[in-house]
Amino acid sequence: MLRLIDVSVHYGRVAAVNDLTLEVNQGELVGLIGHNGAGKSTTLWTITGVQRPSAGQITFEGRSVVGVSPDGILRRGIALVPENRRIFSRLSVGENLHIGTSARRDRRAAQADVKRMCERFPVLGSLYDRQGSKLSGGEQQQLAIARALLARPRLLLLDEPTLGLAPLIVDQVFEILQELKEEGVTILLVEQNAARTIEVADRTYVMRSGGRIQFQGTADELASMGDFETAYIGLAETA
Amino acid sequence: MNEASRRYAAVSGGFVATVLLVVLVLSLIVGAGEGIQYTLDSLAYGSLFAVMALGLALLFNVMGLMNFAYGELIMAGAYVMYFTRSWGWLGMILMTVLVVTILSLLMELIAFRPVRDASPVVLLVTSFAVSYGIQQLAWTDVFGLAHRFDSTIGTGPQKGVEPYPWLTNQFDVGGVLVSRLEIATFIVTGVLLVGLTLLLKKTTLGIQLRASSEDFRMAQLTGVRANWVISAAFGITGVLAGAVAILYILRTGAVAPDIGQGPLFVAFVGGVIGGLGSLGGAALGGFVLGAIINALSATLPITLKSHTQLFAFLVVIAILVLVPNGLVSIRGDAVKRLWRRVRRSPAPAEGAA
């Protein structure tokens, strides 16, 4: 579904991602873990068209998405839940949800989806008229996920959705991800919480500094790699 | 009180406070009767700049652009009015709004779209270049403008749009002289401000504009089309500029290539004192500064009249010192807190004595 082949991304002369090859297949939940500054977020910004790769190919459903604008990429079916949620704080919950349907032409169905989303995330329904800035971190995260889902994406990218959340809320977020996975939503999850990510993901890529993939595999495969834990923990310690 | 309610309260309170202050000051200086008359005129003048500052703030918020070429939209509107004056007032109005809106859209398409992702400095320099370029075009012989308006350069009599006597002649309402133009200014600016508020609050485009003004990149990532939303912002500012051009030129009559610079400067500074980050704040700032300038030019002694802007900008400096983040940052309970401070202050003084 999504393929990155030998993708490199540079900020000036500094390489943030180097020869990255990664694949997400239909219906999979793929994890991408690594310490701060490894290039995980840059990878997502590059897939969504915000950052242009300096080399390599990115294809989605067989078509290249390099050079396509961020709103064009959303229309192709890739939605992003960004780091720190980035909900529109001056807009109400309802307006934030409404913005999520911007790429859709089926206005009536979109309206019905907003209603359904409020049933799925009851807190959003009860806080429909509240300003975004007045929501708690967990509520904002649910809003960011709901906003992205309203575009009816075929691939959902999540950038550290549990960052800065209380442990109880982290559990809730992983429950939501599990539910989405069971519904067949294809997900690429970027996280620092390695253990939880490996547990929920079908496959996980481990990125090291400079945006290179060091390990990849299922939970069992990663567990069988003797040096994985040491290497990952080692990487985490150096962060 | 949430952030949105607080801002609405601040903006509404600001408008009401300005009206009351202008009535009070003018009534004290020139007497109640004339005071009310000058107040009406000052508020009409201020409301023009409220609309203009709103246009500037909209572009500033959506794409981080301070469009100094906005003054040239007023200038273009003035020329269109000059050339279509003989078409009748309806034809003139429609043509002016149409041409100014198209010019605004063309500005975006030709000049600003190619540098959209550039740094704020590049955007600023581009806006100066567009402003200067259009103004120079008007000074040259292209379109016969310079030839027609040669007499405006230097000491010759200034050409302009002939006024409509039925619109500018004043009539008596309970001892206060009012013109239809003043009433029309209130109605048009009121309709534009309310209309724009409804558009921003109630329509999909409005929500997209507000989202883009808060986080443009994220709005794109949620599917908002950048080209569409920015073109819409330029289109809206074009309509606002067209309306301001009509009301302003009908008031002053003068037409010249640099006619837009003065209003642009007032609207820009007004927007800054109101708070350019907020549409309501910018409108309030434009309104306050426009009303102050008009009130000063009406009441200053004849020897000081030419220094109206000096006194107006002294007030601006005072406002910026007191509320550096703009008038809109004043909290809704500011009066209450001030009163509390005033009531508390005598106690230590007595104790000290």
Image (tube, rainbow, N blue to C red):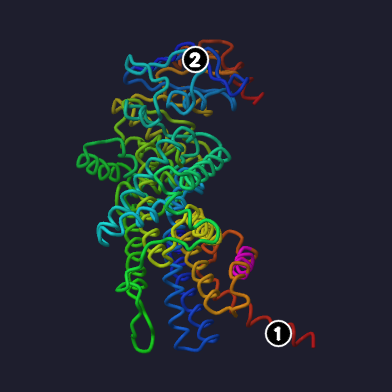
The residue under label 1 is B347
Do we see residue B154 in this rendering? yes
B44, above or below A171, in the image:
below
Q: Image height check: is B2 above or below A68?
A: below
Horizontal and vertical percent position of residue B283: 45, 61
Residue A32 in percent (x, y) is at 48, 22
Q: Residue at x 38, y 54 (%)?
A: B77
Which sits in the foreground, B8 or B120? B120
Q: Residue furthest left?
A: A108
Q: Quick one: quadrant of the N terminus of chain A?
A: top left
Chain of the residue that carries numbered disc 1 in the rendered image: B
Residue type of the residue flagged with mark 2: Val
User: How many other residues sit within 10 Å of disc 1, few (<14), some (14-19) or many (≥20)?
Assistant: few
The segment highlighted magenta reads: B311-320
On screen, residue B246 versus residue B299, left or right, reads left
Closest to the observer, A3 or B67? B67
Residue B178 screen position, x and y as percent? 36, 79
Examine the rendering and report whether any part of residue A166 can be seen: no
Majority secondary structure in the magenta region: helix
Residue indicated by mark 2: A7
Residues B122 and B194: in front is: B122
Is B315 within the magenta? yes
- Please give the name of the residue rendered at 55% of the width and 85% of the height, measured from the top-left corner: B29
For the residue labelled by badge 1, is the local secondary structure a helix, a strand or a loop?
Answer: helix
Of helix, strand and loop, which one carries label 2?
strand
Residue B119 inside the magenta-drawn segment: no
**Compared to B194, does B113 lie above or below?**
above
Q: Are marks 2 and 1 in contact (CB under 8 Å)?
A: no
